[in-house]
Amino acid sequence: MTMRRFNVETGSRTEVVDITETVREAVPEDATGVCTVFVKHTTAGVVVQENETNLVNDIENFLNDLVPDEGHAHDALDGNADSHLRATLVGSDVSVPVEDGELALGTWQSVLFVECDGPRRREVVVDVA
Ligand code: ZN
């Protein structure tokens, strides 16, 4: 088991950040198994998707359109229920097969960090087992 961590700095409230290269660098050269990418937060997540500029904008707009900004019970606590709900739709982890240290991603697949309550400094865990 090899667990590594890295940080992601985000600059907007909702923002997609391509972390594929950082995940790739976190995978040991000789590793074979399953790479889990886990986001240690309740208002951010991670997906495997295509990193195409218009699609990235679509994902950000889609999440914002699906979840209304206001009108949720958790807002009474800290005003960011919309961020939690968007992150719930995204999910906290993805799994990518690894063979000889290489991520077995498809041609158009990238690992995309999804910020739902930025700007913030976030922590991501990469574990190959
Ligand atoms: Zn909250």
Image (cartoon, rainbow, N blue to C red):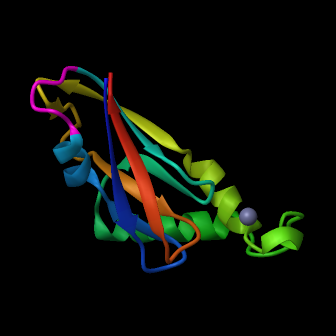
Question: Is 33 rendered above or below residue 12?
Answer: above
Count of marks, rendered view: 0
> Within the image, what quadrant is residue 79 found in?
bottom right
Where is residue 125 shown, x and y percent of the image? 39, 44
Q: Is residue 29 left or right of residue 48?
A: left
28 within the magenta span:
yes
Where is residue 107 shown, x and y percent of the image? 18, 42
Query: Residue at point 23% right, 47% down?
Result: 108
| Quadrant (top left/top right/bottom left/bottom right) for the N terminus | top left
Query: Residue at point 55% right, 50% down?
Result: 90
| Quadrant (top left/top right/bottom left/bottom right) for the C terminus | top left
- Range drawn in magenta: 27-32
Q: Could you tell me what secondary structure mostly forms the magenta stretch?
A: loop
Question: In which quadrant of this rendering is ligand 1 seen?
Answer: bottom right
92 within the magenta span:
no
Where is residue 35 shown, x and y percent of the image? 32, 31
Query: Residue at point 80% right, 75% down?
Result: 70
> Within the image, what quadrant is residue 87 found in?
bottom right
Q: Is residue 126 left or right of residue 23?
A: right
Query: Residue at point 89% right, 72% down?
Result: 76
